[in-house]
């Protein structure tokens, strides 16, 4: 079986992780913010490394670099969404 097709068959949800989790405590929500910030930092580092390895002419067409930038956008967006979901302390 083709792996691309298999991946699509196993995929249940292909979108942003919903930040509205009523069961999430403030500590769990803050932990999730830290997780996405860490993932964003790691992806930013990988993106910078990949860019430095490429010649200027090949940067625009590099698929791996495009995927890293997509992941970075996702992680940054999720960290902001979860940060906005942290309840204010009384």
Image (cartoon, rainbow, N blue to C red):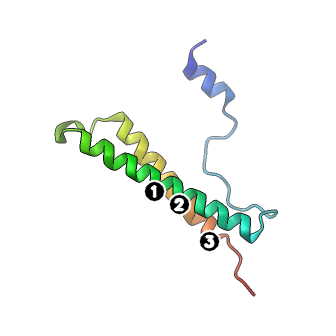
Q: Earlier in the sequence, mark 3 or mark 2?
A: 2
Q: Is the Cβ of the residue at disc 2 closer than 8 Å to that at disc 1?
A: yes
Relative to residue 47, is residue 28 drawn left or right? right
Asked if labels 2 and 3 touch by Cβ distance under 8 angstroms, the answer is no
Give the alpha-carbon distance from disc 1 to disc 3, as whole Å: 19 Å
Q: Which residue is mark 1?
A: 41
| Residue pictured at 45% horizontal, 56% vertical | 41
SS type, badge 3:
helix
Element marked by disc 1: helix
Q: Which residue is mark 3?
A: 84
Disc 1 crowd rating (10 Å Cα; few below 14, some 14-19, many 20+) is: some
Classify 11 as above or below 70: above
Q: Residue at x 73, y 71 (%)?
A: 26
Distance between the alpha carbons at the discs numbered 2 and 1: 6 Å
SS at badge 2: helix
- Residue where numbered disc 2 is placed: 37
The quarter of the image holding the C terminus is bottom right
């Amino acid at each position: 079986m083709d792996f691309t097709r298999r991946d699509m068959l196993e995929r249940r949800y292909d979108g942003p992780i919903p930040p509205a989790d009523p069961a999430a405590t403030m500590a769990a929500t803050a932990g999730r913010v830290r997780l996405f910030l860490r993932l964003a930092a790691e992806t930013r580092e990988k993106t910078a490394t990949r860019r430095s390895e490429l010649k200027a002419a090949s940067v625009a067409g590099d698929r791996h670099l495009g995927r890293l930038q997509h992941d970075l956008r996702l992680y940054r967006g999720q960290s902001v969404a979860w940060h906005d979901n942290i309840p204010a302390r009384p």
